[in-house]
Amino acid sequence: MENTFGIAIIPDNEEERLDKLRSLHLLDTHREEGTFKHIAAMAARMFDVPIAMVNLVASEHVHTKGSAGMAEPLSLVPRGISLCSLAVLREETTVFQNALEEPCLLANPLVSGEFGLRFYAAAPLTTNDGYTIGAICLVDKEPRKFPETDQRVLENLASVVMENIERGTT
């Protein structure tokens, strides 16, 4: 797998994490699920960002399950390019206020290429039994501040996504 980050992007519990993700039967469903799409749209409005996504991180690809603001919605992005690959490595919210100041992002084509990603924030989607299966992500092409209070709100939205996933109400 390509890895544009220059750091390890596979969590220690990768096999168990993937087993849990597969058991949820979400990877082979329609790309834009209703609840996920609505939560992404709500996140984009709440945080005034041009792009918001609900993503699931599988073995080779990141699956976009709901998005807002993408000119051409994506369904699959190679894991070694998607910044969500970094979000599943941490229990806390991942924030890059200015991607050009992050050494691990400088070779990433979403940052260095035409897309021009500058701001990224992602709250992990973690199951009740502790497996991080994806993230709810905010993206902007301009650097921006993301205070801790906003991080807590994004984490609350991630909890709403997980409640829907675990109840099977997506």
Image (spheres, rainbow, N blue to C red):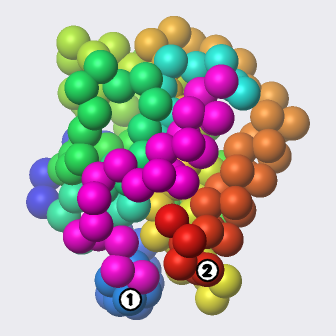
Q: What is the crowding at mark 2: few (fewer than 14 residues within 10 Å), some, or many (at least 20)? A: few
Q: Choose between 48 and 109: the one closer to the eye.
A: 48
The amino acid beneath tag 1 is Ser
Q: Residue at x 38, y 88 (%)?
A: 23
What kind of element bears circle 1?
helix
Q: Quadrant of the N terminus?
A: bottom left
Which span of residues is magenta-colored? Answer: 24-45
Task: Give yes or no for residue 39 being in the magenta stretch.
Answer: yes
Question: Which residue bears the numbered disc 1?
Answer: 23
The amino acid beneath tag 2 is Arg
Q: Choose between 151 and 103: the one closer to the eye.
A: 151
Task: Give yes or no for residue 41 being in the magenta stretch.
Answer: yes
Q: Nearer the viewer, mark 1 or mark 2?
A: 2
Q: Is residue 109 above or below residue 155?
A: above
In this view, which residue lies farthest toward the left? 1
Q: Is residue 52 visible?
A: yes
